[in-house]
Image (cartoon, rainbow, N blue to C red):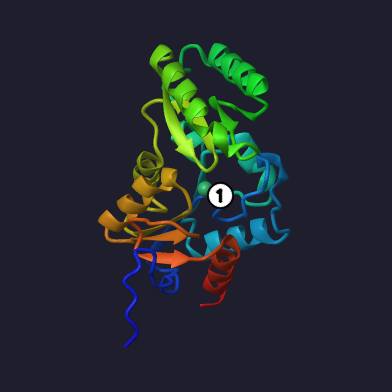
Amino acid sequence: MILDDSPQAKPEPPALNPIGDALFLDFDGCLVEIAPTPDAIKVPDDLPRVLQDLAARLNGALAIVSGRSLHELETFLKGFDGPMVGSHGAEARGMTAPMAHQPAGLSELQNEMADFASQSGLLYEHKSHGGAVHFRSDPAQQPQVEAFAQALAQRFGDFAVQPAKMAVELRPAGFSKDGALAALSNLPEFSARRPVYAGDDTTDEPALAWAEAQGGFGVKIGKGDSVARFRLDAPSRLRDWLAAGLES
Ligand SMILES: [Mg+2]
């Protein structure tokens, strides 16, 4: 018997069950590898078709759930027509958009973030419902970026800080990926199925926990501790697992 008490040791997930599973997938770092900048990701040519075919096998129970804007998701995954949730749950396609009102001060907040990033020599990422400052190019600036974001969230009450990989994001308060999964699960295609969620980041942990708590399971993509029971080492391994689901 091999004993491995590393907190990172987790088995690979069981095969997808097309009859009984509902599949929820994060995008960056999960379906596609993280790139030096958000625009530089490479989407494999066949990914939208694999998602489309898998969604058909699952009778429509496949959704993308991401912190990206819906517009970016639609551009990157052109050819996949299924439900998508963007901006951590603040905008959606294929279901009623959960956004009740535009958060107050959006453009002022975005201007301040862009100014801060430019003064710090860091990348500002514009999002339809917020923004992000990336410190991948200069990780030593993380504490200053976090302090700036916290101060901003104090002043703009409709926004909350969302830590991400090598970035700090401001997004509308009151939305979350686990909330998005709960809303999607009320749709007829998803209800009465076992939720399976795959994600790579700290922002995914509540959604991974939600899937586990509902009798399904979570799949952590890549390194790092997680509440998920299962792990795949890289986005390419997840894509292999999805492709295998087409043949099972
Ligand atoms: Mg991700």
Residue 4: x percent and y percent? Answer: 34, 75
Return the x and y of residue 28 as percentages of the image width and height.
Answer: 57, 48
Q: Residue at left 55%, top 31%?
A: 141
Q: Residue furthest bottom?
A: 1
The residue located at (57%, 38%) in the rendering is: 139
Pick whichever, 68 or 166, lies toward us.
Answer: 166
Residue depicted at x 54% and y 55% = 30
Q: Measured along the vertical axis of the image, is residue 235 above or below residue 85?
A: below
Label 1 beta carbon less than 8 Å to ligand 1: yes
Residue at 46% x, 17% y: name it. 152
- Kindly identify the amino acid type of the residue bearing the numbered disc 1: Phe
**Res 185 seen here:** no
Residue 41 coordinates in the image, percent (x, y): 69, 48
Residue 245 lies, with reference to residue 44, above or below; the image says: below
Say what secondary structure mark 1 lies in: loop
Determine if residue 177 is in view: yes
Q: Quadrant of residue 47?
A: bottom right
Does 209 appear above or below 136? below
| Quadrant, the N terminus | bottom left
In the picture, measured across the screen, residue 16 lies left or right of residue 141, that is left
State the residue position of label 1.
Answer: 27
The percent coordinates of residue 247 (x first, y second) are 56, 77
